[in-house]
Image: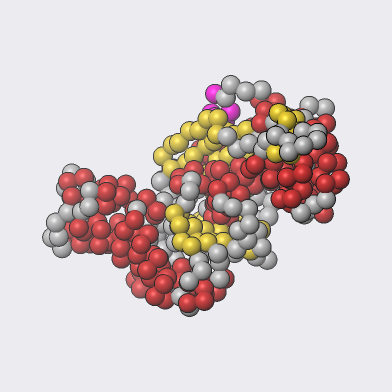
């Protein structure tokens, strides 16, 4: 059996980790992040005894997942052999849906990005969005110069509430709009078109795991990923918290009985927000009142054409109106973050999903607001940082989820 075929099979197993699978994940994560590395150093990093580590590593070598490399420097006696991941043992495709774009990435098992494609996001939440995402995955696979039989799986990150089998999705809409339910099976659609095992995850959940697993120190155990203020990825004790039915992280309440006016009134407190936190809408309202801004020129005088991209450009040009709007948005988001910091006491809060593109004025407003509003015991220890991966966060997070499944169940 080839390594690629073996990797495809382990993706189809149950996700509940046994003791053996937890050890697999711990050892392979250390090798991925620190290789080439000796078995002794793996033992120290994982706190597993050297005999256990050697047995597991020998198993990985037989499977072709790990290779032995150069000898390490020795302080005396026999030089220890170094091991590292075999990046060509398998490949993973990740597809993520963001505020303004769809991103597809193809990576090897060291999570080196071999190719990526970005497209503008389809303008509405519907089954057509899912089909466009499959098209993107298919395109990136077709253009890849690799052994395609070694593509082990595809990770899919999408907004909304997803059932545990990835068969249906409900997109909670903002500001009084009716929720959109998609009965198309995302998992089956991807698998039928691509003939590759698929794992489907909520965008914020994928992003929080991606930031932790691919970017941050492995010792981080408690973390929040704020996905443009409308969704929250929650990491508790190093694992994604999904809740009883997978709906955890939908940050904001709404009722089909409320009017849009009521929705606007509570948006910054308990209600749902627009993806851009309402910043574009507020900028347009100020321009309609006659305030001056480069935004008017960026939209050729048509205020309805002002979008989030134009707002970001205006901030970079230090436009006074744009700066006020994003600072106000940062304060509003900071209050919601403060609530979560008090409730969950995380080590890190990552700001992502697109709003981090507003830069330092926005992020500093979030930080100062959390300092003012959250309890000192929580706010003094939390780090608030922008996403390390930007618009690639969801796609790479989805890749990370697939990789973890592979590593855990090898």
The picture quadrant where one finds residue 365 is bottom left
Q: Is residue 120 left or right of residue 247?
A: left
Towards the viewer: 220 or 97 = 220
Q: So how many labels did they put on this image?
A: 0
Q: Residue at x 58, y 46 (%)?
A: 214
In the image, residue 239 above or below residue 3 = below
Which part of the image, by quadrant, shows the C terminus? top right
In the rendered view, would you say 163 is above or below 265? above
Left or right placement of residue 65 versus residue 336 in this view: right
Residue 35: x percent and y percent? 67, 38
Magenta-highlighted stretch: main secondary structure?
Answer: helix
Q: Locate the N terminus by quadrant.
A: top right
Regarding residue 232, the answer to whether it shows in the image is no
Q: Which residues are magenta?
A: 138-143
Residue shown at 37% from the left, 57% from the top: 276
Q: Is residue 140 magenta?
A: yes
What residue is rendered at 42% in x and 76% in y? Answer: 373
Using residue 204 as the reference point, say whether residue 43 is left or right of it.
right
Question: Does the segment drawn in magenta span residue 22?
Answer: no
Question: In this view of the protein, can residue 99 be seen by the observer?
Answer: yes
Please state the horizontal and vertical placement of residue 292, each as a whole percent of the image: 14, 56
Residue 34 place in picture, x, y as percent: 65, 42
Q: How is the image coloured?
A: secondary structure
Q: Report the front residue among 82 and 342.
A: 82
In the rendered image, the residue lying farthest to the front is 76
- Residue 361, x across and y down, in percent: 31, 58
């Amino acid at each position: 059996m080839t390594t690629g075929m073996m990797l495809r099979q382990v993706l189809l197993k149950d996700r509940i980790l046994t003791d053996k699978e937890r050890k697999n994940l711990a050892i392979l994560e250390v090798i991925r992040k620190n290789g080439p590395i000796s078995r002794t150093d793996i033992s120290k990093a994982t706190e597993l005894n050297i005999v256990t580590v050697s047995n597991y590593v020998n198993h990985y070598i037989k499977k072709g997942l790990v290779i032995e490399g150069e000898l390490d420097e020795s302080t005396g006696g026999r030089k220890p052999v170094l091991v590292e991941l075999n990046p060509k043992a398998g490949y993973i495709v990740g597809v993520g849906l963001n505020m303004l774009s769809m991103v597809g990435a193809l990576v090897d098992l060291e999570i080196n990005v071999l190719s990526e494609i970005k497209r503008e996001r389809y303008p509405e939440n519907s089954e057509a969005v899912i089909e466009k995402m499959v098209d993107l995955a298919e395109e990136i696979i077709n253009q890849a110069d690799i052994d395609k039989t070694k593509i082990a799986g595809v990770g899919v990150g999408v907004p909304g509430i997803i059932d545990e089998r990835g068969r249906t999705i409900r997109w909670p809409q903002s500001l009084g709009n009716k929720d959109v339910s998609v009965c198309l099976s995302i998992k089956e659609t991807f698998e039928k078109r691509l003939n590759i095992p698929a794992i489907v995850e909520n965008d914020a959940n994928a992003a929080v795991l991606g930031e932790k697993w691919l970017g941050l120190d492995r010792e981080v155990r408690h973390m929040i990923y704020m996905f443009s203020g409308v969704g929250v990825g929650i990491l508790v004790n190093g694992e994604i918290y999904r809740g009883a039915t997978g709906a955890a992280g939908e940050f904001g309440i709404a009722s089909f009985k409320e009017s849009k006016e009521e929705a606007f009134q509570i948006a910054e407190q308990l209600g749902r927000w627009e993806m851009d936190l309402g910043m574009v809408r507020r900028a347009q309202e100020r321009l309609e009142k006659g305030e001056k801004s480069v935004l008017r020129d960026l939209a050729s005088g048509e205020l309805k054409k002002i979008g989030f991209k134009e707002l970001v450009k205006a901030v970079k040009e230090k436009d006074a109106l744009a700066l006020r709007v994003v600072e106000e948005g940062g304060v509003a988001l900071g209050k919601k973050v403060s609530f979560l910091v008090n409730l969950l006491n995380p080590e890190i809060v990552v700001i992502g999903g697109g709003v981090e593109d507003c830069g330092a004025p926005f992020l500093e407003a979030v930080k100062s607001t959390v300092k003012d509003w959250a309890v000192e015991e929580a706010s003094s220890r939390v780090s608030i940082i922008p996403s390390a991966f930007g618009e690639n966060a969801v796609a790479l997070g989805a890749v990370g989820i697939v990789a973890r499944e592979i590593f855990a169940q090898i």
